Image (spheres, coloured by chain):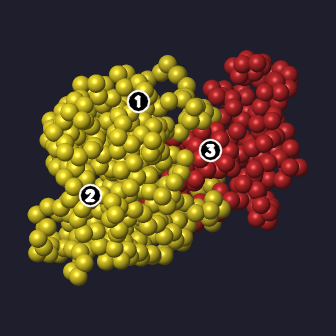
């Protein structure tokens, strides 16, 4: 019986009990349009090597592009960066990271996209096809309202006291300020059109079979010849969560162990030594894993960068029924993108070429 | 009326203090008690809370009257549950909270006093991020339904469930670390 433990809650200090009466908002979310605007802004920034912004930065040549999860919870400053053509938003506590740190520490990336068709929610990044080929409109010269009102969340009360460590940190996208400084896309040296919202939607493909996992259960998922995953759930957290990439006709080539840690920070994945095949693309293989704790679910993912293709496997973990909070619903999703800038459309295996 | 003034009335042994207390916190105490026990018992627990407060103040001088009364009411409810263990299974939010804790921390704590356990729980809650701690208190102290907690903090019920699940797991690990499990 746990009655004694239940009883022991009566010993809570008065101040703890009293503070729980304060109606505080949940962590505010990145506004979908703000996220989309940031992505679009970053796409333009990506065309300008070494472009720095006030709080963030972007470096490297333009290239791959992926959307941010509008439901993720990130702290402090956010930077948009590119890494050899890949683009992400880096969340950092305190000072904005420098460009080198961003490009050298992919584990700090919060990738993920909500534009996949299989699980559209109200928080997903809305893809406006009418915006294709256009820069984001609106308050480009001003600050982007990262947390506009109207999301149904209360504003935390101003107690006048010391800074509450749990207060939602401001997440600022000052990239929009840099937009006016950017050259016109048509005046750049790009030979192809810039990535657009429409293109963003096209490059994502999703396959999200769902499974209800009870404590002690495991689930495996295999997406054809390319990607697979395995999850073992103990009722509280995943004991094991691995996402695997293997090239067609080859044994396992890269495994991202996304086993959960207590940290809410993204987890840097390592590529085990035993996943060290001699492959032509080995030199360009990059792998990273991450975890984002959202309000509704927890997102685990791994990104495999193979040449011009960026594969991503995501595992969404959503609590089961409220009456049985120990269960969890997992969905494995796979997506890919390719370097649209140079027109390379690699062999995508079982995936159809989105341009075809 | 301000809590401070109500407490002063108790100290001056003015019986009107009970009426003021009831006017201000009667609904809150009743609603809380009904999550633990039946409606009839909840009414009795509420009344007993006033009596207990009357007998305890002074010498007690609660700095936070609402939390003070809530603790009294909660303990009275638990006493009643203990006397009628069958009622515990009769439904109610408290029974669900008990089940949740039992699943997450399946230990009888036979060799641990409630006092020691309470101290550990107190420290644990303080170690949690503010929001998670508050959610755990609303659930485990007040036995508040998940949907009510979600409404209180402007969250989705699923997010509250996730927070609670993680906090219970952390609590188990914390108690293990403290040698109480």
Secondary structure of the residue carrying tag 2 is strand
Where does label 1 land, which residue? A137
Q: Secondary structure at mark 1?
A: loop
Q: Where A176 sits versus B180, above or below?
A: above
What residue is drawn where x is 12% and y is 73%?
Answer: A279
Q: Quadrant of the N terminus of chain A?
A: bottom right
The quadrant where residue A274 appears:
bottom left
Chain letter belonging to callout 1: A
Q: Chain of mark 2?
A: A
- Rendered image: mark on residue A348: none
Q: Specify the chain shown as yellow.
A: A
| Disc on the earlier residue, 2 or 1 | 1
Q: Position of residue A25 (x, y in %)?
A: 55, 35
Say which chain is red: B
Residue B11 position within the rendered picture, expressed as x and y whole percent measured from the top left = 74, 21
Near-viewer residue (B1 or A278): A278
Q: Residues within 10 Å of mark 2 (few under 14, many from 20)?
A: many
Alpha carbon separation for disc pair 2 and 3:
41 Å
Left/right placement of residue A54 relative to residue A4 reads left
Q: CA distance from mark 3 to mark 1?
A: 35 Å
Which part of the image, by quadrant, shows the C terminus of chain A? bottom left
Secondary structure at numbered mark 3: helix
3 and 1 marks on the same chain: no
- Identify which residue, A322 or A8, lies in the foreground: A322
Give coordinates of residue A260: x percent, y percent: 37, 61
Q: Which residue is the site of mark 3?
A: B150
- Mark identifier at residue A338: 2
Are the numbered discs 2 and 1 placed on the same chain, yes or no?
yes
Lateral position of residue B13 relative to residue A356, left or right: right
A130 vs B91, left or right, is: left
Residue sitting at 35 percent across and 68 percent down? A352
Residue in view at x 42 percent, y 35 percent: A34
């Amino acid at each position: 019986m746990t009655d004694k433990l239940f009883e022991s809650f009566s010993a809570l200090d008065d101040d703890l009990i009293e503070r729980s009466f304060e109606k505080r908002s949940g962590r505010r979310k990145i506004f979908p349009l703000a996220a989309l605007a940031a992505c679009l802004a970053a796409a333009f920034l990506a065309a300008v090597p070494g472009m720095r912004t006030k709080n963030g930065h972007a470096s490297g040549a333009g290239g791959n592009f992926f959307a941010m999860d509008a439901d993720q919870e990130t702290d402090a400053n956010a930077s948009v960066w590119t890494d050899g053509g890949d683009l992400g938003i880096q969340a950092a506590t305190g000072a904005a990271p420098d460009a080198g740190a961003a490009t050298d520490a992919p584990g700090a990336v919060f990738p993920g996209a909500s534009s996949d068709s299989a699980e559209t929610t109200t928080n997903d990044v809305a893809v406006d096809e009418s915006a294709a080929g256009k820069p984001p409109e609106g308050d480009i010269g001003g600050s982007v309202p990262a947390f506009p009102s109207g999301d149904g969340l209360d504003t935390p009360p101003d107690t006048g006291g010391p800074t509450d460590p749990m207060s939602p940190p401001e997440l600022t996208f000052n990239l929009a300020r840099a937009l006016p400084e950017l050259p016109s896309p048509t005046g750049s040296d790009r030979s192809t059109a810039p990535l657009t919202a429409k293109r963003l939607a096209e490059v994502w493909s999703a396959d999200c079979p769902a499974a209800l996992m009870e404590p002690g259960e495991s689930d495996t998922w295999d997406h054809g010849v390319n990607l697979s995953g395995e999850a073992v759930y103990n009722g509280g957290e995943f004991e094991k969560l691995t996402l695997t990439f293997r090239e067609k006709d080859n044994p396992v080539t890269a495994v991202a162990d996304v086993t959960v840690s207590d940290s809410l920070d993204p987890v840097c994945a390592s590529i085990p030594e035993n996943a060290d095949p001699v492959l032509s693309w080995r030199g360009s293989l990059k792998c990273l894993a991450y975890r984002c704790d959202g309000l509704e679910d927890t997102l685990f993912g791994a990104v495999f960068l193979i040449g011009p293709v960026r594969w991503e496997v995501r595992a969404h973990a959503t609590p089961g029924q409220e009456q049985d909070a120990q269960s969890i619903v997992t969905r494995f999703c796979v997506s890919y993108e390719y370097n649209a800038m140079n027109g390379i459309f690699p062999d995508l295996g079982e995936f159809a070429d989105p341009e075809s | 009326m301000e809590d401070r003034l109500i407490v002063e009335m108790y100290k001056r042994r003015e019986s009107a203090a009970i009426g003021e207390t009831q006017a201000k916190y009667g609904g809150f105490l009743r609603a809380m008690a009904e999550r633990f026990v039946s409606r009839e018992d909840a009414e009795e627990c509420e009344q007993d809370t006033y009596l207990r407060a009357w007998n305890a103040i002074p010498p007690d001088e609660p700095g936070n009257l609402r939390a003070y009364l809530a603790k009294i009411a909660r303990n009275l409810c638990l006493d009643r549950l203990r006397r009628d263990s069958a009622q515990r299974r009769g439904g109610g939010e408290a029974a669900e909270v008990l089940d949740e804790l039992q699943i997450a921390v399946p230990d009888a704590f036979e060799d641990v006093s409630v006092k020691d356990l309470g101290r550990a729980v107190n420290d644990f809650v303080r170690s949690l991020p503010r929001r998670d701690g508050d959610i755990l208190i609303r659930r485990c102290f007040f036995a508040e339904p998940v949907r009510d907690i979600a409404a209180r903090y402007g969250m989705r019920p699923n997010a509250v469930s996730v927070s609670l699940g993680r906090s219970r797991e952390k609590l188990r690990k914390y108690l293990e670390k403290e040698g109480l499990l």
